[in-house]
Image (spheres, grey):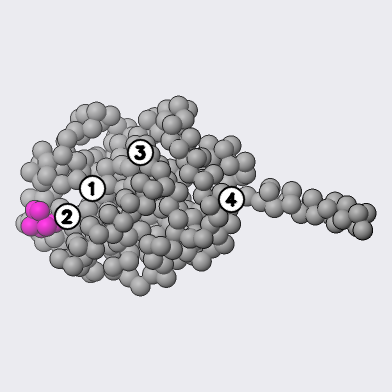
Amino acid sequence: MPHRRTLLTALALPAIARAQERPIQLFVGFAAGGNIDLAARMAAPFLERLLGAQIIVVNRPGAGGMIMLNDMAQAPADGRHAALVSFPALVTALFDNTPRYRLDSFAYAGLLTDEPYTLFVAPNARWRTLRELVEDARARPEEITIAGAGAGSAPHLATMQLEAAAGVRFTWVPTPGAAQAVQLVQGGHVAGSVSTVSLTVRAHNQGALRVLALMERERWDRAPDIATFAENGFPLAAGSARGIALPAGTPEPALRRWEDAIREVAHNPEFRAMAERDFVVVRHMDRATMTAFVQAQAAEYGAMWQRSPWRR
Protein backbone atom coordinates (compact mmCIF):
# COMPACT_ATOMS: atom_id res chain seq x y z
CA MET A 1 0.00 0.00 0.00
CA PRO A 2 2.78 2.51 0.78
CA HIS A 3 4.38 1.61 -2.55
CA ARG A 4 1.08 2.30 -4.33
CA ARG A 5 0.79 5.75 -2.61
CA THR A 6 4.34 6.58 -3.65
CA LEU A 7 3.59 5.60 -7.22
CA LEU A 8 0.41 7.67 -7.31
CA THR A 9 2.24 10.65 -5.86
CA ALA A 10 4.98 10.35 -8.45
CA LEU A 11 2.42 10.20 -11.23
CA ALA A 12 0.61 13.23 -9.85
CA LEU A 13 3.68 15.46 -9.61
CA PRO A 14 4.05 16.15 -13.36
CA ALA A 15 0.36 17.04 -13.57
CA ILE A 16 0.73 19.45 -10.64
CA ALA A 17 3.79 20.99 -12.23
CA ARG A 18 1.97 21.41 -15.53
CA ALA A 19 -0.95 23.09 -13.75
CA GLN A 20 1.45 25.48 -12.03
CA GLU A 21 3.03 26.32 -15.36
CA ARG A 22 -0.28 27.11 -17.06
CA PRO A 23 -0.27 30.76 -18.16
CA ILE A 24 -2.57 33.38 -16.72
CA GLN A 25 -4.93 34.96 -19.22
CA LEU A 26 -5.40 38.70 -18.72
CA PHE A 27 -8.37 39.82 -20.80
CA VAL A 28 -8.87 43.28 -22.27
CA GLY A 29 -12.24 44.28 -23.70
CA PHE A 30 -10.83 46.51 -26.42
CA ALA A 31 -8.66 46.13 -29.50
CA ALA A 32 -4.86 46.02 -29.40
CA GLY A 33 -3.02 49.33 -29.45
CA GLY A 34 -5.52 51.29 -27.37
CA ASN A 35 -4.87 52.86 -23.97
CA ILE A 36 -6.28 49.96 -21.92
CA ASP A 37 -4.39 47.38 -23.98
CA LEU A 38 -1.16 49.34 -23.53
CA ALA A 39 -1.69 49.55 -19.76
CA ALA A 40 -2.27 45.78 -19.59
CA ARG A 41 0.89 45.03 -21.55
CA MET A 42 2.90 47.44 -19.42
CA ALA A 43 1.77 45.79 -16.18
CA ALA A 44 1.94 42.17 -17.39
CA PRO A 45 5.72 41.56 -17.01
CA PHE A 46 5.68 42.92 -13.46
CA LEU A 47 2.66 40.81 -12.52
CA GLU A 48 4.33 37.74 -14.07
CA ARG A 49 7.30 38.00 -11.73
CA LEU A 50 5.11 38.41 -8.68
CA LEU A 51 2.54 35.75 -9.53
CA GLY A 52 5.08 33.24 -10.82
CA ALA A 53 3.36 32.50 -14.12
CA GLN A 54 3.40 33.72 -17.69
CA ILE A 55 0.67 36.26 -18.45
CA ILE A 56 -0.95 36.33 -21.87
CA VAL A 57 -2.91 39.47 -22.74
CA VAL A 58 -6.04 38.45 -24.62
CA ASN A 59 -7.94 41.12 -26.57
CA ARG A 60 -11.66 40.52 -26.85
CA PRO A 61 -13.14 43.77 -28.21
CA GLY A 62 -16.76 44.63 -28.84
CA ALA A 63 -19.76 46.44 -27.37
CA GLY A 64 -17.62 48.86 -25.38
CA GLY A 65 -15.94 46.02 -23.49
CA MET A 66 -19.17 44.19 -22.64
CA ILE A 67 -18.38 41.07 -24.71
CA MET A 68 -15.23 40.46 -22.68
CA LEU A 69 -17.02 41.17 -19.39
CA ASN A 70 -19.77 38.69 -20.26
CA ASP A 71 -17.15 36.03 -20.94
CA MET A 72 -15.14 36.86 -17.82
CA ALA A 73 -18.22 36.49 -15.63
CA GLN A 74 -18.46 32.87 -16.84
CA ALA A 75 -14.73 32.11 -16.79
CA PRO A 76 -13.21 29.58 -14.38
CA ALA A 77 -12.71 31.07 -10.92
CA ASP A 78 -9.21 29.61 -10.66
CA GLY A 79 -7.04 32.69 -10.24
CA ARG A 80 -5.71 32.25 -13.79
CA HIS A 81 -8.47 34.19 -15.53
CA ALA A 82 -8.46 37.92 -14.90
CA ALA A 83 -9.30 41.11 -16.73
CA LEU A 84 -8.03 44.65 -16.79
CA VAL A 85 -11.40 46.36 -16.50
CA SER A 86 -12.20 49.99 -17.16
CA PHE A 87 -14.48 52.38 -15.31
CA PRO A 88 -17.02 53.71 -15.79
CA ALA A 89 -17.43 51.34 -18.78
CA LEU A 90 -18.04 48.27 -16.59
CA VAL A 91 -20.95 49.93 -14.76
CA THR A 92 -22.46 51.97 -17.60
CA ALA A 93 -23.07 48.84 -19.69
CA LEU A 94 -25.42 47.64 -16.95
CA PHE A 95 -27.90 50.41 -17.76
CA ASP A 96 -27.81 50.71 -21.54
CA ASN A 97 -27.53 47.03 -22.48
CA THR A 98 -28.55 43.58 -21.32
CA PRO A 99 -25.22 42.15 -20.12
CA ARG A 100 -24.85 38.68 -18.68
CA TYR A 101 -22.95 40.01 -15.69
CA ARG A 102 -23.72 42.02 -12.55
CA LEU A 103 -21.46 44.00 -10.24
CA ASP A 104 -21.17 40.94 -8.00
CA SER A 105 -20.12 38.75 -10.92
CA PHE A 106 -16.55 39.85 -10.19
CA ALA A 107 -14.05 40.06 -7.38
CA TYR A 108 -12.19 43.37 -7.58
CA ALA A 109 -8.53 42.77 -6.75
CA GLY A 110 -7.17 46.30 -6.98
CA LEU A 111 -7.12 49.53 -9.00
CA LEU A 112 -3.91 50.36 -10.86
CA THR A 113 -4.41 53.52 -12.98
CA ASP A 114 -6.78 56.48 -13.29
CA GLU A 115 -6.36 58.98 -16.12
CA PRO A 116 -8.20 62.10 -17.28
CA TYR A 117 -9.61 62.35 -20.77
CA THR A 118 -8.57 64.65 -23.55
CA LEU A 119 -10.52 65.78 -26.59
CA PHE A 120 -8.29 65.79 -29.65
CA VAL A 121 -8.38 66.45 -33.39
CA ALA A 122 -5.99 65.99 -36.30
CA PRO A 123 -2.85 68.15 -36.24
CA ASN A 124 -4.00 70.07 -39.31
CA ALA A 125 -7.60 70.59 -38.11
CA ARG A 126 -9.00 74.11 -38.30
CA TRP A 127 -9.90 74.17 -34.60
CA ARG A 128 -7.19 75.45 -32.30
CA THR A 129 -9.20 75.40 -29.07
CA LEU A 130 -12.10 73.52 -27.58
CA ARG A 131 -14.15 76.71 -27.62
CA GLU A 132 -13.69 76.98 -31.40
CA LEU A 133 -14.87 73.38 -31.85
CA VAL A 134 -17.93 74.00 -29.68
CA GLU A 135 -18.84 77.19 -31.56
CA ASP A 136 -18.61 75.28 -34.85
CA ALA A 137 -20.77 72.47 -33.44
CA ARG A 138 -23.34 75.01 -32.31
CA ALA A 139 -23.54 76.38 -35.83
CA ARG A 140 -23.70 72.91 -37.41
CA PRO A 141 -25.69 70.56 -35.13
CA GLU A 142 -24.78 66.87 -35.52
CA GLU A 143 -22.42 67.56 -38.43
CA ILE A 144 -19.21 67.25 -36.43
CA THR A 145 -18.23 63.62 -35.81
CA ILE A 146 -16.54 62.32 -32.66
CA ALA A 147 -15.23 58.73 -32.65
CA GLY A 148 -14.75 56.30 -29.79
CA ALA A 149 -15.94 53.05 -28.24
CA GLY A 150 -19.64 52.11 -28.43
CA ALA A 151 -22.67 53.98 -27.13
CA GLY A 152 -22.58 54.30 -23.36
CA SER A 153 -18.79 53.92 -23.22
CA ALA A 154 -16.86 56.26 -20.95
CA PRO A 155 -15.58 58.44 -23.85
CA HIS A 156 -19.13 58.65 -25.20
CA LEU A 157 -20.46 59.76 -21.82
CA ALA A 158 -17.69 62.33 -21.51
CA THR A 159 -18.69 63.71 -24.91
CA MET A 160 -22.31 63.80 -23.81
CA GLN A 161 -21.31 65.79 -20.73
CA LEU A 162 -19.75 68.38 -23.03
CA GLU A 163 -22.85 68.39 -25.24
CA ALA A 164 -25.09 69.06 -22.24
CA ALA A 165 -22.84 71.77 -20.84
CA ALA A 166 -22.35 73.53 -24.19
CA GLY A 167 -25.81 72.99 -25.66
CA VAL A 168 -24.47 71.29 -28.79
CA ARG A 169 -24.89 67.95 -30.56
CA PHE A 170 -22.10 65.89 -32.12
CA THR A 171 -22.51 62.66 -34.09
CA TRP A 172 -20.93 59.70 -32.31
CA VAL A 173 -19.00 57.19 -34.45
CA PRO A 174 -18.42 53.90 -32.56
CA THR A 175 -15.11 52.06 -32.93
CA PRO A 176 -13.69 48.79 -31.49
CA GLY A 177 -11.25 50.78 -29.35
CA ALA A 178 -9.27 53.96 -28.84
CA ALA A 179 -6.52 53.06 -31.33
CA GLN A 180 -9.05 52.79 -34.15
CA ALA A 181 -10.55 56.16 -33.18
CA VAL A 182 -7.09 57.74 -33.37
CA GLN A 183 -6.65 56.30 -36.86
CA LEU A 184 -9.96 57.77 -37.98
CA VAL A 185 -8.97 61.18 -36.65
CA GLN A 186 -5.52 61.11 -38.23
CA GLY A 187 -7.01 59.97 -41.54
CA GLY A 188 -9.51 62.81 -41.58
CA HIS A 189 -12.50 60.46 -41.46
CA VAL A 190 -13.90 62.02 -38.28
CA ALA A 191 -13.37 65.40 -36.67
CA GLY A 192 -12.14 64.27 -33.29
CA SER A 193 -12.14 61.78 -30.46
CA VAL A 194 -11.93 61.45 -26.68
CA SER A 195 -9.27 59.33 -24.98
CA THR A 196 -6.92 59.30 -22.02
CA VAL A 197 -3.68 61.23 -21.61
CA SER A 198 -1.55 58.09 -22.00
CA LEU A 199 -2.72 57.67 -25.59
CA THR A 200 -2.84 61.30 -26.67
CA VAL A 201 -0.31 63.54 -24.91
CA ARG A 202 2.80 61.96 -26.43
CA ALA A 203 1.18 62.11 -29.89
CA HIS A 204 0.25 65.75 -29.23
CA ASN A 205 3.84 66.57 -28.25
CA GLN A 206 5.11 64.84 -31.40
CA GLY A 207 2.66 66.70 -33.64
CA ALA A 208 0.69 63.58 -34.60
CA LEU A 209 -2.49 64.85 -32.91
CA ARG A 210 -3.73 68.14 -31.52
CA VAL A 211 -5.20 67.92 -28.04
CA LEU A 212 -7.71 70.75 -27.68
CA ALA A 213 -8.33 70.35 -23.95
CA LEU A 214 -7.83 68.20 -20.89
CA MET A 215 -11.07 67.11 -19.21
CA GLU A 216 -10.02 68.45 -15.84
CA ARG A 217 -10.56 71.60 -13.81
CA GLU A 218 -6.83 72.28 -13.39
CA ARG A 219 -3.90 71.90 -15.74
CA TRP A 220 -1.73 68.80 -15.51
CA ASP A 221 1.91 69.47 -14.69
CA ARG A 222 2.98 66.75 -17.15
CA ALA A 223 1.36 68.67 -20.03
CA PRO A 224 1.29 72.31 -18.94
CA ASP A 225 0.61 73.65 -22.45
CA ILE A 226 -2.74 71.85 -22.72
CA ALA A 227 -5.69 73.95 -21.56
CA THR A 228 -8.47 72.42 -19.48
CA PHE A 229 -12.16 72.14 -20.24
CA ALA A 230 -12.71 74.59 -17.38
CA GLU A 231 -10.48 77.19 -19.03
CA ASN A 232 -12.67 76.88 -22.12
CA GLY A 233 -15.77 77.58 -20.08
CA PHE A 234 -16.84 74.01 -19.27
CA PRO A 235 -15.90 72.93 -15.70
CA LEU A 236 -16.11 69.20 -16.43
CA ALA A 237 -13.90 66.34 -15.30
CA ALA A 238 -13.94 62.77 -16.59
CA GLY A 239 -11.53 59.96 -17.25
CA SER A 240 -10.93 56.24 -17.16
CA ALA A 241 -9.86 54.18 -14.14
CA ARG A 242 -8.52 50.65 -14.58
CA GLY A 243 -8.03 47.72 -12.29
CA ILE A 244 -7.97 43.96 -12.10
CA ALA A 245 -11.18 41.92 -11.75
CA LEU A 246 -11.50 38.14 -11.46
CA PRO A 247 -14.59 35.93 -11.63
CA ALA A 248 -16.62 35.85 -8.42
CA GLY A 249 -15.82 32.75 -6.44
CA THR A 250 -12.09 32.96 -7.04
CA PRO A 251 -10.49 31.43 -3.93
CA GLU A 252 -9.39 33.82 -1.21
CA PRO A 253 -5.68 32.81 -1.39
CA ALA A 254 -5.63 33.62 -5.11
CA LEU A 255 -7.33 36.97 -4.53
CA ARG A 256 -4.79 37.84 -1.84
CA ARG A 257 -1.95 37.01 -4.24
CA TRP A 258 -3.45 39.27 -6.90
CA GLU A 259 -4.09 42.07 -4.41
CA ASP A 260 -0.53 41.89 -3.14
CA ALA A 261 0.89 41.74 -6.67
CA ILE A 262 -1.10 44.79 -7.81
CA ARG A 263 0.09 46.73 -4.77
CA GLU A 264 3.70 45.77 -5.49
CA VAL A 265 3.38 46.77 -9.16
CA ALA A 266 1.79 50.12 -8.32
CA HIS A 267 4.67 50.98 -5.99
CA ASN A 268 7.46 49.48 -8.09
CA PRO A 269 9.90 52.27 -9.06
CA GLU A 270 10.60 50.70 -12.46
CA PHE A 271 6.88 50.44 -13.26
CA ARG A 272 6.25 54.00 -12.07
CA ALA A 273 9.11 55.28 -14.22
CA MET A 274 7.64 53.51 -17.27
CA ALA A 275 4.21 54.91 -16.44
CA GLU A 276 5.56 58.44 -16.17
CA ARG A 277 7.43 58.04 -19.46
CA ASP A 278 4.23 56.95 -21.20
CA PHE A 279 1.94 59.47 -19.44
CA VAL A 280 0.09 56.72 -17.57
CA VAL A 281 -1.30 57.97 -14.26
CA VAL A 282 -0.84 55.38 -11.48
CA ARG A 283 -3.53 55.30 -8.79
CA HIS A 284 -3.61 52.30 -6.50
CA MET A 285 -6.58 50.96 -4.54
CA ASP A 286 -6.71 47.72 -2.55
CA ARG A 287 -9.57 45.23 -2.82
CA ALA A 288 -11.85 46.86 -0.30
CA THR A 289 -11.30 50.38 -1.64
CA MET A 290 -11.76 49.31 -5.25
CA THR A 291 -14.98 47.46 -4.40
CA ALA A 292 -16.34 50.60 -2.72
CA PHE A 293 -15.24 52.63 -5.75
CA VAL A 294 -17.14 50.31 -8.10
CA GLN A 295 -20.30 50.60 -6.00
CA ALA A 296 -20.01 54.40 -5.95
CA GLN A 297 -19.58 54.44 -9.73
CA ALA A 298 -22.71 52.32 -10.15
CA ALA A 299 -24.72 54.70 -7.96
CA GLU A 300 -23.43 57.78 -9.78
CA TYR A 301 -24.03 56.52 -13.30
CA GLY A 302 -27.30 54.86 -12.36
CA ALA A 303 -28.58 58.26 -11.24
CA MET A 304 -27.25 59.82 -14.45
CA TRP A 305 -29.08 57.18 -16.49
CA GLN A 306 -32.33 57.97 -14.71
CA ARG A 307 -31.93 61.66 -15.56
CA SER A 308 -30.76 61.25 -19.15
CA PRO A 309 -30.49 57.83 -20.83
CA TRP A 310 -27.56 57.72 -23.24
CA ARG A 311 -28.99 55.27 -25.77
CA ARG A 312 -28.87 56.64 -29.32
- Left or right of 146? Residue 59 is right
Q: Position of residue 119 (x, y in %)?
A: 23, 46
**Image quadrant occupied by the N terminus:** bottom right
Nearest to the observer: residue 235 or residue 75: 75
Q: Which mark is residue 24?
A: 4
Q: Nearer the viewer, mark 3 or mark 2?
A: 3
- Amino acid under disc 3: Arg
Whether residue 112 is situated above or below residue 73 in the rendered picture: above
Question: Which residue, given by chain and number where applicable, does mark 1 sit on?
Answer: 238
Question: Which residue, given by chain and number where applicable, does mark 3 sit on?
Answer: 283
Distance from the alpha carbon under mark 2 to that under mark 4: 38 Å
Whether residue 119 is situated above or below residue 250 in the rendered picture: above
Nearest to the observer: residue 70 or residue 274: 70
Nearest to the observer: residue 284 or residue 270: 284
Q: Are marks 1 and 2 in contact (CB under 8 Å)?
A: yes
Report the span colored magenta. 163-168
